[in-house]
Each structure stands twice: as structure tokens, then as C-alpha cells.
Image (tube, rainbow, N blue to C red):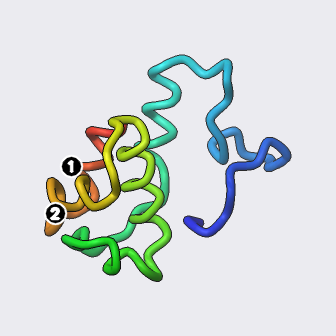
């Protein structure tokens, strides 16, 4: 559920990234995250009402020192798969 925050109290270990997770475990958790079936928008306004897409774009932006607008300029129009692969 893209609207839920990560939670250490959730029963599923996949609901969060732990400080003790190794790189492969983190990548696996990101790949298993719920995705949005529609193509990514080319501008930030298009992320409204699409929490899964917004989360993935935000993670990628944060990891790469980019804005969401820059990420969408690069990946806009693509389905989330390619972006999820880059994030993972």
C-alpha cells in the first residue's frame, strides 16, 4: 500500500528497510514494492493520487541528489519497471 509509512511494528519484514539489511535485501524489498501499472508522468502534478509512483520517484530522487522533476524528465512516459530497476 503506497499510502502507508514504513513501520517497524508491522508484522512483515518487507514493510521497511532495516539498518541491518544488506544491499541485496534492500534491492529485493524495493523490487517487491507495490507498483503503479500506469506510465510515469512527465511532470510532478501527474503524481497526484499515485502514491506508489510518487514514492518510487522520491526514493530515486533522494538517492541521486535530484529533484522529482529531474527524475520525471528522465523517466516520464515509462512504466515503473525501469525506474524500479535503477532504484534497486
Residue at the spot 23% in from the left edge and 61% down from the top edge: 72
**Label 1 vs label 2: CA separation?**
7 Å
Q: Are marks 1 and 2 in contact (CB under 8 Å)?
A: yes
Q: Residues within 10 Å of mark 2 (few under 14, many from 20)?
A: some
- In the image shown, does 72 or 23 lie closer to the viewer? 72
Q: Identify the secondary structure beneath mark 1.
A: helix
Q: Is residue 67 left or right of residue 18?
A: left
- Can you identify the residue that label 1 sits on? 82
Residue at the spot 68% in from the left edge and 50% down from the top edge: 6
Residue at the spot 36% in from the left edge and 46% down from the top edge: 61
Pick the quarter of the image with the C terminus: top left
Q: Identify the secondary structure beneath mark 2.
A: loop
Above or below 12: residue 23: above
Image-quadrant location for residue 75:
bottom left
Residue at the spot 26% in from the left edge and 49% down from the top edge: 83
Above or below 26: residue 34: below
Give the percent coordinates (x, y) of residue 13: 70, 39
Give the percent coordinates (x, y) of residue 44: 32, 72
Give the percent coordinates (x, y) of residue 71: 25, 53
The label number, if any, that marks residue 45 in the structure image? none
Q: Residues within 10 Å of mark 1 (few under 14, many from 20)?
A: few
Image-quadrant location for residue 48:
bottom left
- In the image shown, does 64 or 86 lie closer to the viewer? 64
- Can you identify the residue that label 2 sits on? 78
Pick the quarter of the image with the N terminus: bottom right
Above or below 21: residue 9: below
Q: Is residue 72 left or right of residue 2?
A: left
Q: Residue lying farthest right?
A: 9
Amino acid at each position: 500500500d503506497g499510502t502507508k509509512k514504513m513501520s517497524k511494528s508491522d508484522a512483515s519484514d518487507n514493510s521497511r528497510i532495516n539498518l541491518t539489511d544488506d544491499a541485496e535485501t534492500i534491492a529485493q524489498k524495493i523490487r517487491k514494492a507495490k507498483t503503479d501499472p500506469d506510465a510515469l508522468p512527465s511532470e510532478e502534478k501527474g503524481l497526484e493520487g499515485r502514491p506508489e509512483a510518487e514514492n518510487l520517484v522520491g526514493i530515486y530522487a533522494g538517492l541521486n541528489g535530484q529533484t522529482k522533476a529531474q527524475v520525471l524528465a528522465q523517466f516520464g512516459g515509462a512504466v515503473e519497471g525501469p525506474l524500479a530497476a535503477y532504484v534497486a
